[in-house]
Image (spheres, rainbow, N blue to C red):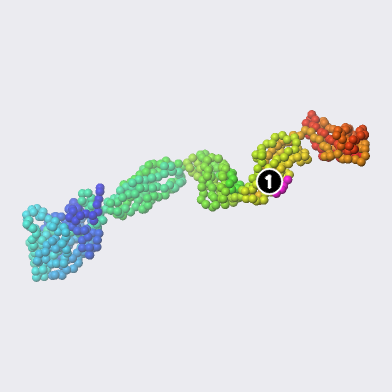
Amino acid sequence: MAYVKLGAMAEGSIVKLNEDGAPVEFYVAKQDYAPELNGTGRVLLVRKRSDGEYRKFHSVKYALFGDSDIDVWFNGEYKSRLDLDIQTAMGSTKFYCAVGNDSISVLERPVFTLSCVELGVTASWCTTGDGTKLETADILLPPHPDDPSINRNYWTRTHSNRGYSVSLGVINPSASGISEYTYYANEAYSDMAMGLYLPCYMLPATLSVGKDGTVVTNTEPTAPSSITIPPQINGGSTITVEWGPASDEEDNLEGYKVERSVDGGSSWTQIYQGSARSTANLVPFGTQSVMYRVKAYDTEGLESGWKTSGQVTVINNTAPTAPESITVPEAVQGGQPLAVSWGASSDGENNLFGYSLERQVDGGAWAVIYSGNELSFSDTITKGWQTVAYRVRAFDEYNAYSGYAASETREVNNNTPPVITCEYPANTPLGVKNEGFEIPYSVDDEEGDEVAVTESVDGTAWRTFTAALGESNIFSLMGTDFMRVLNGRHTLDIAAHDGKAEAVHSLTFTKSVTSASVTLTGPMEADGPITMCALSVSGSIPADAEFAVEAANNALDAVPVWEDCTAAVKLGVNHIFANQTAANGFAFNFRVRVSRGESGKGGYITSVQGGFQ
């Protein structure tokens, strides 16, 4: 039903109030009646018609309105005919009234009657000062309830000023118009002095008037417009229940009551009462289903109907355990990838779904950077970050999350590692090598820091030096350096370190050498003929190896004469030279040649010693 406020009703319009439970029409006679006495926000109502019952004013002579039977009847028997909420709402009204001959004061009553001047009568006998003409005065005096042509008397609260000590004025309207008449005090109490009456009283302007004109002190609020709960609810979790607003015609909405049912609506338990439009509620683990409903209530205790949610089946699922660990390298390099790994979680319902990895940069907010079922993630560290930390938690297929496993906060090294430039990309296999070789490369550093370079073979430092940035360097495995390396697979490392970060360039090769030869770098000259020599070869030479030792006493000649002295070396005896000539002068040299035999067993030569004469 649509309602309007009583204070919005036009003066002269008609409303209804119950007397003894039956509706009776009243005029809206005045908005804010006598505001200097009663303030604003109240409305004067005057009964449209008398109930047809004639009553005498008082039973004794010289009665004032404040002492009259009609006053007592108004505020006793008549008032009790009204609904209790209307009796409570009306309160008391202050009005001007004669309290003696030509003496006006202020009286206060719940129910009273109008004065002559308020009804527009200015007869000579009327006292003045007991009110002001109402703009609705012309419609307030009704026709006779039985016959409009019959004159009838209406009691007012106006007293006579014709010399009598006390008298009461009565309006006696006729079919031809309003006339005056006065029952004097010595008549007003008699059974002959009978009149009709129009009770009036004031009600708050905030009361509502229904479409049929009925005044109501209060109406129930509308039901809340909606109620919302999560579509998925986990047992043991706290959910938020939200609802739309309710409305109230009297603007006295006070709050909402929320109830929960765990048995499909058979029984309900209140979980909230208050003015908010949402509440948090813990759904105990083990609950099978849940539904909620909400209603509004006003300051008078009237309640709306319920707004009920759908029924949601509760998922009684436990969260996974937290990952047992999280591993973050201690060295974190700006601009470089970083491998983060963590231990596995377990789930009581065997429905583990994955892991959520979060990152915190420079002590700021945590942000999810990975969600999936892997146990590791390669992050990229932005250059310029000062610190970084990680935490990870597990979740199951119902989005139940475990606690976190958190890492220590790592400082980020924003220094750029040195750059090693080589014609062979890192980790390139160089293939089989059977003789010495060289690797050219250069080293540079973005910050221009001093760079220490270490060249290593199989983890053993070969050479360490301070690199000239941008200039060419040679990693050399020539001559005896190559000889020092055994057959097999080997790793070459070029490591460049600027004091803050290191870069390593690795290459691999396989050494495969099955023969070796040893000779002097240059012949040894003699003053005279060389007639004999003595040589010994130390090392490990397999028995089936092809082993030969030769010597020459004319090594400066274009074609030296090489004489086989293998047997003498094996026996440890001197070798006597057969050659006796030397075109370029006598000079000594030797050469040792060894090749693997059928067994494939390798060996080595540690030294060749001897002399000549």
Report the front residue among 519 and 582.
582
Residue 467 lies within the magenta run: yes
Query: On the image, numbered disc 1 is attached to which residue?
Result: 471
Give the structural element (helix, strand or loop) at label 1: loop
Label 1 Cα crowd, 10 Å radius (few <14 / some 14-19 / many 20+): few
Q: Is residue 358 left or right of residue 463?
A: left
Please give the name of the residue rendered at 54% of the width and 40% of the height, measured from the top-left corner.
Answer: 373
Please give the name of the residue rendered at 57% of the width and 52% of the height, measured from the top-left corner.
Answer: 386
Instruction: Inspect this view and state whether residue 303 appears.
Output: no
Residue 406 location, x and y as percent? Answer: 56, 48
Q: Which residues are magenta?
A: 463-468
Where's the C terminus, which quadrant?
A: top right
**Residue 607's quadrant in the figure?**
top right
Residue 418 location, x and y as percent? Answer: 64, 47
Q: Amino acid at mark 1?
A: Glu
Report the front residue among 422 and 384.
422
